[in-house]
Amino acid sequence: MMTKIRQMAFVLFAIFALTSCEEEDNNPINPLTAHAGDPTEGFVGYSAILDGSKSTNASGQPISYKWEVSTKPNGTTATIEGKQEVLAKFTGSLPGEYVVRLSISYQSWEDEDTVTITLSEDEEPTLLADAGEDRSMEIGQAVTLDATQSTFEGAGVQILWETVSKPESSIVAIQNSNQLQATFNPDKAGEYVFKLTMTKGSLKSQDVLKITVLANGSGGPIIINEDILQDRTLSNVFTSDPDKLDYLVTKDVAVKGAKLTVEPGVRIGFEEGTGLIIAENGSLKAYTLDFTNQPIVFQGKEAEKGYWDGIKILSKNPPEYIAGIEVKDAGKLGYGLLIGPETRLFLTHSTIHHNEGVGIWFEIRSLISEFKTNKVYDNSESPLRIPARLMESIFWDSEIEGSAIQITEGKILSGLENFWPSYTVGYDILEDLVIYNGSSLVLTYGTKLNMADDKAIRVISGSVLRILGEANNPVIVEGKTKSKGAWRGIFIENSQMRVSSIGFAEIRHAGSNAITGQAPATIKLGNGGRLKLFNSTLNDGKGIGLEAVASNIILEMTDNTIKNHQNYPISVTAQMVEHLDYLTRMEDNAQNEVLVDGFNALAKDGGEIIWKGFAQRVSYLVKGLGRDLRIQSGMRIKAGVVIKMQDGSRIDVQDANGRLGYLNIEGVAGNPVIIQGVNEVGGSWYGITYSTNHAQNVINQAIISNAGKTMSNNFSAAITVDDIPQGSLLIQNTKIAKSGEHGIAVSKQFLDFLRISSLTFEGIAGEEILAWE
């Protein structure tokens, strides 16, 4: 019977225990207990110790610490040195009570506590603990903890040295811990932290001392050969010999779930083929203000480019300050410093040099908080490899030297203005550079873009490109391969009322393939594109120099040169011709004519259309989808203009859509307007037909040739004054040559609507003037 009772009791106990475990799993207990230390008194201008060493974690795992000032007297400043250390130093600028909060964390657990620090004004404190300067020692030697530099008066001072932290598995103990001079014998290499407490009556003062013990008793660097899984600070070991390695990394080291802090003056060497990785949940803080005398150096054990891997920062934590570092001899993996995706870099006053590959490599989704006053040079491939959108964050005062900056992932979509510094090294554009979403890219004098093979610059969706060079210092955009057709060119489309500007620029080697449409071009305007082009040169293109044949475009040109293209220098719609500049120079192009597409009628409200021609008398070649010119409003053709018409084409002057059309051809003696067939074959095109009765229908000082193409069911003439609808014309001082049939044709009934004087006819197959009935 007793056995059964015992069995039943055991079953009930097991059920209760199991139930309790389930309840405990569903309602876990916070293992953390924060302890910010006992209330402390101190003096204004002198540090007081914040002590979180009595905080506990029931799981036995390391704790993360965070100190912050909660309340303070009005008007005071308070600082905490070592905010994330178990012991921190607090300083206040005014007397009074300060409340400091300690927050501790482990995984998702948190706890906090506060401590009150009372500061009083005392220029010469009667009790002030001084544990001495942090230093390094060799293992095997006894170490003296010396408080003799402390300030105290009289007898009765109580002294206590305590060990706060020591290397793992160390069993070191302090001897004479209640004396001004205590000792200990280090048994492991690493960092030892001690707290000195001095009390006298109600007064108490504390200080902290860090001793770094070197391995092997040789005075060599401290070896780092395993991942850093807890917060760790690397202190300057050889303060009297700044060129000596303080630490040597002998295998790949990753910082995981911890912060690595590197103090001023620290020099870290790396064995061949090793590197440092800051993992996604880790962080690196390497910060010095004495950039000249106490830089933080990451270098190879041997001073050879590519000797060690480099530093890879993958942290997704908030950015730590990195200032005054030097990275050299790295690049075995192709970089000195690599910034991972979603990692945010804060880098100032640093030097990245003497590395194989790229100095600093920013991956596609990396970020920059600040990049100022850095020096990047003597890296074998490139100083920077960086997405286009991040160049805006590279401050102009950084010194970038060597090969060109490599631009990857060319999307600029911030919707803001992006100014690229005009570094003399220039930029290698490795992917299409696409500016969209209302963004702007601004390139100033001295900037040079080297476009990779078959890549393009696209300016779309309300965005603009502003190239602003100077007369003697232009912006240069050319192929990375220095030959015709190396890259595609510049494409501007859907500008949404915003105007791109290209001024004092040299654009070379474009036209590898068509960006859109069929013909490649150095600069191409798509539908809705807007461009102001001035004082610039388009050179060595494989296609057309400038193409503007799309709809709803705006083009303004002043004093440009287009040369050495394998196609036409300019291709535009008939509507765009009036926007071409008289001083445009076109030289050594394979087809040195301006290609004009007359697909849409020439019509303008509130003014005349004026074709000015060019100082070099470069001709307009009417060709394309529309080989005819239909003039449906006022148009004036200035002296020196040369127009070439395709076989079977015509020029019609019409009234349309409420507009009164006219054509006024106004050459001058010695500089006539010339309108001829493209092949200079008699009767190759139909000629000019005036179907409007307008006083501005005038031809003066012109040569009209190769017109009058014969028709099987009608007569033809080089110039026709129509009767339905009624036309009129004043023509004088003009030569009509090589007509396929008649020179001028006019209805006999309306012969008075044709007024002539000083005409010359040459090679007319039919009548010089035909008056038909």
Image: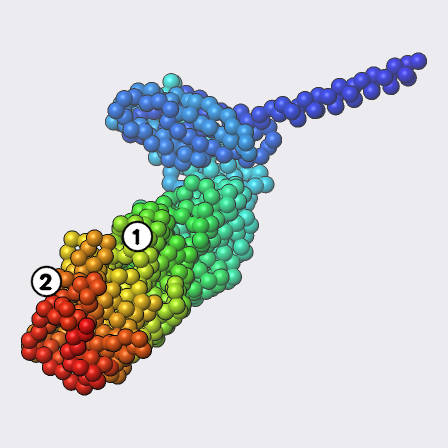
Q: Quadrant of residue 593?
A: bottom left
Disc 2 marks which amino acid?
Ala
Q: Position of residue 609 (x, y in %)?
A: 17, 61
Circle 1 residue: 495
Q: Residue at x 82, y 20 (%)?
A: 11
Q: Position of residue 130 (x, y in %)?
A: 37, 33
Circle 2 residue: 695
Q: Residue at x 49, y 30 (%)?
A: 104
Q: Quadrant of the C terminus?
A: bottom left
In front: 204, or 87?
87
In front: 285, or 403?
403
Tell whether 107 sits left or right of 666: right
Disc 1 marks which amino acid?
Ser
Vertical order, 608 against 560 (above or below): above
Kindly tell me whether residue 293 is visible in this rendering.
no
Vertical order, 37 against 249 (above or below): above
Tell whether 248 sits left or right of 289: right
In front: 668, or 354?
668
Q: Quadrant of the N terminus?
A: top right
